[in-house]
Amino acid sequence: MSKTEYVSPEGLRLDGRRPMEMRQLRAEIGTVAKANGSAVFEMGNTKVIAAVYGPREVQNRSQLINDHALVRCEYSMANFSTGDRMRKPKGDRRSTEISLVIRQTMEACILTHLMPRSQIDIFVQVLQADGGTRSACINAATLALADAGIPMRDIVTSCSAGYLNSTPLLDLNYIEDSAGGPDVTVGILPKLDKVTLLQMDAKLPVDIFENVMGLAVEGCKAIANYIREVLLENTKQLEFRRGL
Amino acid sequence: MRGLQLPLSQTQRIRLQRAFEKLQSLSSKANSDASVTVADTIPVNYEDAFLKGHGTTDLNGELVATVCGVVERINKLVYVRGLRARYKPEVGDIVVGRVTEVAQKRWRLEINFSQYAVLMLSSMNMPDGIQRRRTALDELNMRGIFEENDVVCAEVRNFQHDGSLQLQARSQKYGKLEKGQLLMIDPYLVKKSKLHFHNLEQFGIDLILGRNGFVWVGEHVETRDSMLLDQANSSVQSMVLEEKNQTHTPLEMRQNICRIANAIRVLSTLGFSMDADLIVETVELSSSLKIDIHDMLGSEFHVLVAEREAERRSLMGKRRR
């Protein structure tokens, strides 16, 4: 492994961030006209679009659940999202796994028992991939679900953190992600203060892991604050435009 | 924030922004901090007894919102009125739906609810207006009444114990809708009122504002109670009706339908709650300014409507004071 310097002696990362600095966040609600709820979420150069349909009639009768809603999720990556334009088959291992991860995290926060015998579809697509697509997808899905007016226990936010050049780094980008170091993705429910998602590639000693995870949780909380701001602004807009 | 996806010029953007600011200042007096998002704590006096309503949940003794919306308090009840969501039916609501399935003795209708609604053959008037038991023959002829993809207007009858929704169409004013356009808007934009059927006489148009956010704009049809007609007479009547069906809709009528439909589209993209008066006003604004029907969906008309609405609401506010 070549010895690339991911953190310069001045304490700056390759893209000029500090180790504990996140990329710029941007969110927009209501980007898909036909969907019940939709959002675009950007973390730096990572850009993800999410659309939520439902609660609606279950399409496949055999999947109907009598006492709560069926949640489905489909993750895909646009062909143009990565540097080299690759034609990826739909339903490869990676996307099936991420679909499952997103579905499970979202199902944990949706109050499915309020919408029995129905189904909720979440579609997320990566428009630009620059590391942390998993986190960005979860954040986008949260925003889209809130826009669709689906009752939730709490919002879910997610953020990743890594450990390179013996420094914990927050919100890895593509270059740092592909360095092969440990990469911890955390998803939390900020109000309940609970972890709903925790994934790690590679190994880390326990004491350092705690540090890195703590950093990722801090990142999640920062994202949660931003998402709530966006949601509140959106609700206020809708309310005053609606009028009496 | 929800952005309007319109190509706006610099001046249009500023005008729109100013109109929205005006609207905001008009509404903010009433309730400025009642808006909540998911997982916000709702301030309540815990010493008093209170009832937690829709959109709220109990978390470690705190009252927490589960949807984004506005907190409403009625006596002891505290609930969150959600804004954008699918339709939540109430008994007696007038809805417009689309038939998705013809099943045993029933039609299933898509009405923007979490399930399809059920319209039983027995809970609707037969087109010939005769009251009788529904025979097996009637059941076989169900496609003669409504087919898949037909647009139907009905009333919410009740909830079954399993949570499914039953509709009824026991009057001449309900039934199949033809010669018009169906628009799907957000249900929170349709105000609940005594009247959801509107006959816009100046245009010769029927407007049905379904509570589920489905809006029907169609050619006016005379509803007559065929119960009062003789048997002999009714056969003649149906012949006349058939003849009428074959004739096409005149161009002027189609233009009127499109103009009203576009007015509704504009109001819905701007997020203004609508009633028949506001729609007619918007239509009149467009025709008085001689704006083409297809230009109504352009940015300029959106800006005009927003400015007009800001003015209208400020006038309404003054009148109230």
Image: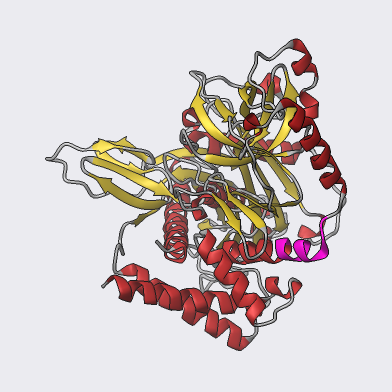
As drawn, which residue projects farthest toward the bottom?
Answer: B11
Towards the viewer: B92 or A109 = B92
Q: Residue A66 lies in what quarter of the image?
A: top right
Is B251 contained in the magenta span?
Answer: yes
Image x and y of residue A5, in percent:
63, 65
User: Which colour style is shown?
Assistant: secondary structure
Q: Main secondary structure of the magenta part?
A: helix
Q: Residue A56 lies in what quarter of the image?
A: top right
Image x and y of residue A202, in percent:
62, 42
Image x and y of residue A91, in percent:
79, 38
The answer to whether residue B55 is above or below residue B103 is below
Residue A7 lies left or right of residue B142; in this view the side is left
Asked whether residue A202 appears in the rendered view, the answer is: no
Q: Please tell me which residue is depicted at 75% across the width and 50% down the height of the picture.
A: A77
Image x and y of residue B47, in percent:
12, 40
Q: Which residues are magenta?
A: B249-257
Towards the viewer: A157 or A182 = A157
Q: Indicate the quadrant containing the C terminus of chain B: top left, top right, bottom left or bottom right.
A: bottom left
